[in-house]
Amino acid sequence: MRTTGLRAVFAAVLLVLAGCAAPTAAPGGDASPATPHPDRDGFDDPDQDVLGWENGYWYDEPIAVDQSDGLNDSEMEAFVARGMARVEHIRQLEFDERVPVSVVSRDDYRSASAGGAASPDSEYNRWNDQVWEALFIAGESTGSASAISATTGSSVLGFYSPSDGEIKIVTDSPGEPTIDNATLVHELVHAVQDQRFDLTDARFRSETQDGDLATDGVIEGDASYVERQYSERCAAGTWDCVATPDTQNSRGGDPNLGVLITIYQPYSDGPVYVHDLYERGGWEAVNDALRNPPVSTEQTIHVTDESPRPISFADEGTNGWSTFPDQGVEGSDTVGEASMFAMFWYQARTSGAETVRVESIADTNSRYDTYNYDAEPSNGWANDRLFPYRNAAGADTEYGYVWVTEWDTDGDAREFRDAYLNILSAHDATQRDDGVYVIEDGSFNDAFRVVRTGDRVVVVNGPTPADVDEIRPGLAS
């Protein structure tokens, strides 16, 4: 997805927050009825392929695979083939062709991710820097590209690339590779999604951060839902499953928890969203959602089909301040409810801001939900557009932004404004007589004007109070 630098791949991501352990699902039954299969005697013709049988392996037969010393070629072939058969059995979708699986070292993955990213000084990254700075997640001393690269480099366990139809497992021991059952199954679901629905199609790409996360809600939600069904069968002893050594994937690195919470939202709320679809209409309802993905994280957080409210905007910047017209949607991004929640949670955790209770992220009510992204300051989101600004008139280019947010009610808008002001307070902002707040020190040292008018809140940011007035003149506090 675009916000993480993983737009062309679909990954399995691990996230466990210290002090906020993810709930563990109790072993459960099958998510779908058993698939009848023909007489197995002599059934070895790929032209007669059926659900639950792949490359000579049935979904419920044991295989001779021991990962204690890594996987050899024959073990890898058997492990992947049976995994494909099991995905078919649970997901009720047939693979069109075999899925190549290879391994890559974590160091090589980090290097490739960093090398494939745009230059930190690219127009896109300068634009995106303001998006993540507005969220108080990546400040001026870090930059969005570095924060995202460091986070994904340490948290991705494996990924599927639609461009080459291949799964790559990220491991610390490429010479003696091991693969976790859940990671393999997760990526195999992406492979069958791609084969049946074409993950390179335009409907799976968005020009906004919220749109990417929303689309991933059904893509990753589907994969995570099937992964959970598979893991429950393993835990219950319903299926014989290959054990994975405890030493696999130490990961390391220094992830930015604000970025990680943001990009993890589809893996957490997506399975709940997909489970609701499955309960109401079976796998065909999930297939329909892949054909017509959700458009906002509000839809996946709250399992709703409520559409975002349109927001119009006219650039009023003066004295050299202008938007980035070639980036995003007419220069704007939409961060959405999930990213707003991440902002409030991250600032509560790192700066002690009075926004949300840090432990509330573990308050879930579904066995498919890992973390809770529903909080008062971000709930009631109706839409937002965040316009990064730049000014190259002086010796150095300066940056700022205008963030227009719409809310369902005046009360929702007030809750967002109050929580946002609490973030400013946590960074020792002082309010001037003209209503502008100034943070003097740190990664977010800037000037801010925050204005609520009914169910709309507008945040204007610039290096100085004078810049704030030039970026959005006439906006009274």
Image (cartoon, rainbow, N blue to C red):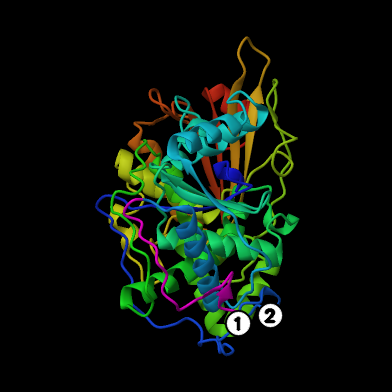
User: Whole-percent x and y of residue 216?
Assistant: 58, 58
Magenta-highlighted stretch: main secondary structure?
Answer: loop
Tell me if label 2 and label 1 are in contact, CB under 8 Å: yes
Highlighted magenta segment, given as a residue range: 51-69
Q: Relative to the observer, which residue lies in front, 395 or 27?
A: 27
Relative to residue 371, is residue 187 drawn left or right? right
Mark with earlier residue (2, 1): 1
Q: Is residue 187 visible?
A: yes
Q: Amino acid at mark 2?
A: Gln
Q: Is residue 54 magenta?
A: yes
The residue under the point 47% across, 81% down is 31
Q: Is residue 434 visible?
A: no
User: Whole-percent x and y of residue 354?
Assistant: 32, 47
Task: In the rendered view, tell whether residue 383 sits above or below residue 62.
Answer: above
The residue under the point 63% across, 62% down is 98
* Residue furthest top in the image: 395
Task: In the rendered view, tell whether residue 73 sits above or below residue 332.
Answer: below
Q: What element does badge 1 sit on?
A: loop
Q: Relative to the observer, which residue lies in front, 381 or 125?
A: 125
Q: Which mark is residue 267?
A: none
Q: Which residue is mark 2?
A: 48
Q: Which residue is mark 1?
A: 43
Q: Amino acid at mark 1?
A: Phe
Q: Is residue 445 magenta?
A: no
Question: Label 2: few (<14), some or many (≥20) within 10 Å?
Answer: few
User: Whole-percent x and y of residue 424?
Assistant: 40, 37
Q: Relative to the observer, which residue lies in front, 378 or 114?
A: 114
